[in-house]
Image: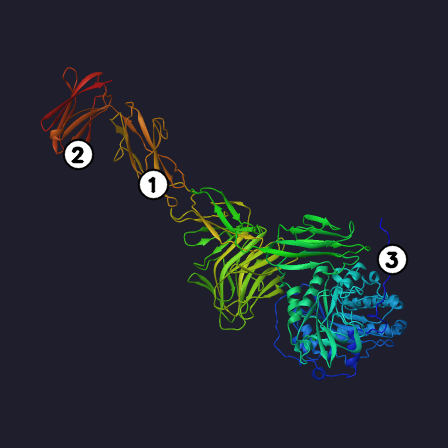
Amino acid sequence: MRATIGILFLVSSFFCSAQISVMQEQSQHYAQFGAQSEAAWDSIRAAEGAPAVVQRTQDRGSCALTKRVYGWHPYWVGSVYNNYQWNLLSDLCYFDYTVSPTSGNNLNSSFQWSTSGAVTDAISNGVDVHICATMFSGHSSFWASSAAQQTFISNIISLLQARGGKGVNIDFEGMGASDRIPFTNFMISLSNQLHSAIPNSEVSMALYAVDWSNVFDVPALVPYVDAFIIMGYDYYWSGSTTAGPDDPLYNFQTSYNYTLTKSMTFYLSQGLPESKLLLGLPYYGREWETVSGTVPAATTGNFSVTRTFNVVQANANGYYNTTLWEPNSFSPYYVFQVGGNWRQCFINNGYSLGKRFDAVNQRGIAGIGIWALGYDDGYMDFWDKIEEKFTNCSVVPCTDTIYDMGGPLRNYYNDEDFTYTIAPSGATSLDLDFTFFNTELNYDTLWLYDGASTAAPLIGAYHGANGPGLVSSSGPALTMRFKSDGGVVNAGWYAVWNCFSDVTAPATQISVPSAWVTQNFTASFTDTDNSGGSGIEKSFYNVSDYDGTEWRANAANGFFTDDFVLLNPEWISAAGTWNVGAGVLEQSDESQSNTNIYAALTQNLSNRYLYHWQGKIEGAGNNRRAGIHFFSDDGSLANRGNSYFAWFRVDQQSLEFYKTINDVFYLQSSVPFALQPATWYDFKIFYDRILGTIEVYVNDAFIASWTDASPYAGGDYVSFRSGNCNWQVDDFRVYRSRFPSVNVSIGSPAADIRHQNPNPSTPSGSIASITKDAAGNLSPVVWQDVNVDWTAPAPAAPLEDGSGSDIDTTYNLAQLEANWGASSDQHSGLVQHFYAIGSTPGDSDVVAWTSNGLAANVTHTGLSLAPGQWYYVGVRAENGAGLISQAVVSDGQVAELSTSVQDPAAGISAGAFPNPFADRLFITLSLAREARVSAVLRDGLGRAVAVMNDMQVAPGAHTLPLQVEADLAKGLYLLQVRIDGQEFFANLAHH
């Protein structure tokens, strides 16, 4: 249990009841001039030493704010609003409606809300506009008059309604403790009435840098007030006895410790949500006469004046030549002499203001306020810092230092409680080195997490003198949370971070079956990042097939491939003139502001999709733009129904992200991007349908991203679009995210690969892979071709017994012959034939299936054929894919014994079969020349039982039948064959 510590706050002479704010000071000063035109105000301020308004072309940047930037526009700054950077301003508050405590009406004759050009320009640029209502005295009279309060509320509602204003900012200064309850009641009444009269309107209020009298009942106000803005200035004011920074970030003096960081800590500890708190910061500084040139120095009381940033930067008087740095408060200052008297001027520059912006980010509050817009006119330093710290173009440095709210040399505060993520731009990992650490043991604690939030793994919790030392992240971010209680405070901590960046592209490899693919198969991928790199973040693949003319992909399976060999029927030209020539898709009608060619594509099969193409924008106009719609649910509509589209503007040098809802498009983000006309670029767009993040790469360099909080989860179409330009597109592919291995289907119209090789040397399938590491580096696209054949070769035909024409009988019991027509295979080619011999059709009981190479005939020797047995030859063909045709079987040949004699010298041979014979007998002849032939068959008694009469026989091989009597007795017979007078004899058996 801790002892309660009593703290006595001593009111310093720096703040007293006579203090007036810069707003009051300047309001009273310019009130003396009455109502003036903008040009007149320019002249008045110039006469007082302000630099002339620098009229210049607006720098209409495309960076989008990530914090609120709420700027007060005093009427007396004249026409400087022409130079406001509207894209870097979320809210413009017109200053001021001076509230009459007795009537509630406006006492300010210079109030020109209804005609102000600043208000008009703000609205036209999408900036919310507000009215600032001030009251510097007479509060008790106002609280006593319900009529005055109601008049004021009614007036404000009418004024806002007349110009489409967003809300009212209440700046009631000089209040004391007695005003706490009536002020709270007034704010509740104002909030209820304004919100009722104007939906989505806003009530905001100015908070004192130090609430000395406990005026603001924060818990009671929070439910009713939409935004609270700390007036983070006048910590050192015109009446201060010591010269010092108008807005010290950290303690300037140990005896007076009120600072910007303490103000934020105080109001947050009162229960103000970070989302409702803004920190007002000065675009001016203050100059005093001092007793010496040292810092700190006492003021003389003889001279004090505000100096705007542009006055100091212009340095017309030559006083502001050397900028000095006050390290305790993080404030620049100047020291010089005028008439022999010392002066000191404290005023922010771009660097110091950027450090105050860093504190806003560190505390996680909603944004900043600016007093006052136009005080920097002519200089971009502050606008640049807003863009650097509070937009989607922000760059977090690779090396920087972070402190507790006490800064480098002072103690932290009671009741600090903040979470901050350090994520340097482009970092893959970082080190955080705590060079000093000292908090209250067991109570004031720092937690560190290895990631982008407190949900990441906890590295450790540290308090007392047990600091973290050097901490290294495993990824691109570290998150810290620091919390102090309401008791003892110590010196605290500070740390330096250094990041490490991965700029090396990852690599990807593909493994598919090396042999011919005949059925669905697995493609495996190996994705690697460099040693010490950020690691693989996501990988993608595409499956394409070759239809014999061009490479395409199955859009129903979430892939798309088109090299635009021709304009395929999948593309529907809905608007514009689209043609394919020289392998490029071209839209050539530059008069069209919204062209459309679309194709169906299923886009809900993977969590992420990649759209990849080459494109070129050219033409004669000055508003040339083109891009792509994706995740569209109706490609035929003007804005493709519900979809996203990325839009590249050549003449505006920008990239725009759009979301279309019910065929109405809404600009979501615009970023600068230098795109040259008539130049080919490689475009890649990644979309995560779960997280809603769209990332755009051009020539493999990351350009920008945008995240949809309510993402489309599916789409049916993609569409190319152009406006007033010639738009050329080539090599369009759509990839899906993947795992390390995927199944690839083949063989049907619904498959990934729908075609077979058109020939053995031309693949019909191709797998493409690309991977992305956590640092955003992209690998090259890698392709792996696949040879595909799922069709067996055509069977051999015709198949004939014998070596030539088909035979039915063979007389050689040791061999069989067969021949067949050539087999064929279009896809993988013919590799070999197999043959088999069986005793029944299709059987292989005589000779098993045997390779015969590519020969189309066979003579199989070494057989022992059975006389009278029929034999059948079967043949199969095998292709390069290993597929085997159906077997073709011959009609068979019977094996028979034969008796033969020959006279090689005379070119004559003769024979007879079968032997033995039954009811048939054949004479075989082979003649080298024409001859007279006759034959007679005699029984054992020499009687002629069969005769073939003399006949003239042509050269060649012949088989001649000899008619045998059906009732011939069994036994031995003699066959006598005469050929041109030469006789041949053979003994035959009859059974």
Q: Is residue 621 left or right of residue 832?
A: right
Identify the residue shown where x is 63% and y is 51%. 473
Question: Upstream in the sequence, badge 3 or badge 1?
Answer: 3
Q: Amino acid at mark 3?
A: Gly
Q: Amino acid at mark 2?
A: Gly
Q: Which quadrant holds residue 161? A: bottom right
Q: Residues within 10 Å of mark 3 (few under 14, many from 20)?
A: few
Which residue is under mark 1? 823
> In front of the other: label 2 or label 3?
3
Question: Upstream in the sequence, badge 1 or badge 2?
Answer: 1
Which residue is under mark 2? 956
Q: What x and y, as percent, mark residue 308?
A: 71, 76
Question: Upstream in the sequence, badge 2 or badge 3?
Answer: 3
Residue closer to the observer: 250 or 421: 250
Q: Is residue 885 left or right of residue 371?
A: left
Which residue is under mark 3? 6
Q: Which quadrant holds residue 236? A: bottom right
User: Dot 1: what SS?
Assistant: loop
Residue situated furthest left in the rendering? 981
Q: Is residue 272 left or right of residue 716?
A: right
Q: Are marks 3 and 1 in contact (CB under 8 Å)?
A: no
Q: Amino acid at mark 1?
A: Ser
Alpha carbon separation for disc pair 1 and 2: 31 Å
Alpha carbon separation for disc pair 3 and 1: 104 Å
Q: Is residue 804 above or below residue 129?
A: above
User: Dot 3: what SS?
Assistant: loop
> In front of the other: label 3 or label 1?
3
Q: What x and y, as percent, mark residue 515?
A: 42, 42
Residue closer to the observer: 671 or 785: 671
Q: What x and y, as percent, mark residue 134?
A: 81, 74
Q: Is residue 738 above or below residue 665?
A: above
Alpha carbon separation for disc pair 2 and 3: 135 Å
